[in-house]
């Protein structure tokens, strides 16, 4: 059983990606739980949860400084997205300033909707309100 989530950003749009891998017998339940968690996102983020995410992000940011390739990639992404390169201290400060109210405001403005679901397996899965393939 495996579940993960991440994101991709571009200059004029971004997307969140979720993945789960499980047995065929639990596939529908896994999809149902994942969709329910996405659906409850607005209004459900706790300060403790956000602090854990921020700690993980800060740790990853600091650790990537050990790799020249990772630093070069980060510099290229910053230049592409914002047109300048921020220092490590400036990036860490941005992470520190992030709070639940800001995340909730973004979710209120851009709620998770119009989801695309792709599944691989022996049986098709049901997506509530989805368009059959």
Image (cartoon, helix red, strand yellow):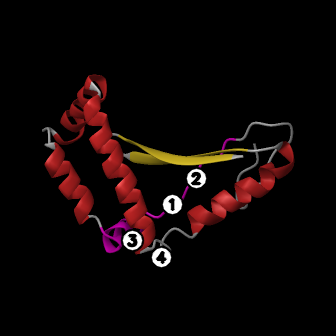
Residue 118 place in picture, x, y as percent: 67, 41
Alpha-carbon span between mark 2 and mark 3: 19 Å
As displayed, is residue 62 above or below residue 73? below
Q: Which of marks 1 and 4 is nearer the N terminus?
A: 4
Q: Which residue is drawn at 39% across and 46% down?
A: 14
79 magenta-colored: no
Which residue is label 3 attached to?
Answer: 104
Alpha-carbon span between mark 3 and mark 4: 6 Å
Label 3 crowd (10 A; few <14 / some 14-19 / many >=20): some
Q: Which of marks 1 and 3 is nearer the N terminus?
A: 3
Range of residues picked out in magenta: 99-118
Q: Residue at x 35, y 43 (%)?
A: 60
Alpha-carbon span between mark 1 and mark 4: 12 Å
Label 1 crowd (10 A; few <14 / some 14-19 / many >=20): some
As displayed, is residue 42 above or below residue 38? below
Quarter location, residue 68? top left
Label 4 crowd (10 A; few <14 / some 14-19 / many >=20): few
Quarter location, residue 62? top left
Residue 103 place in picture, x, y as percent: 36, 66
Q: Do the residues labelled 3 and 4 touch (CB within 8 Å)?
A: yes
Residue 20 place in picture, x, y as percent: 66, 46
Q: Which of marks 3 and 4 is nearer the N terminus?
A: 4
Alpha-carbon span between mark 4 and mark 2: 19 Å
For the residue pair 119 and 92, the one nearer the viewer reads as 92
Label 2 crowd (10 A; few <14 / some 14-19 / many >=20): few
Which residue is label 2 attached to?
Answer: 115
Q: Are marks 4 and 2 in contact (CB under 8 Å)?
A: no
Query: In the visual, does 53 lie left or right of 102?
Result: right
């Amino acid at each position: 059983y495996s579940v993960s989530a991440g994101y991709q950003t571009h200059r004029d749009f971004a997307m969140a990606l979720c993945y789960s891998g499980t047995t065929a017998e639990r596939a529908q339940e896994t999809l149902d739980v994942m969709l329910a968690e996405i659906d409850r996102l607005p209004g459900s983020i706790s300060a403790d949860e956000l602090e854990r995410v921020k700690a993980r992000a800060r740790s990853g940011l600091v650790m990537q400084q050990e790799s020249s390739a990772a630093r070069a990639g980060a510099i290229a992404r910053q230049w592409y997205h914002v047109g300048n390169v921020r220092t490590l201290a400036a990036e860490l400060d941005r992470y520190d300033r992030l709070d639940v109210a800001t995340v909730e405001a973004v979710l209120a403005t851009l709620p998770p909707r119009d989801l695309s679901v792709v599944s691989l397996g022996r049986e098709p899965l049901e997506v509530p309100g989805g368009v059959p393939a």
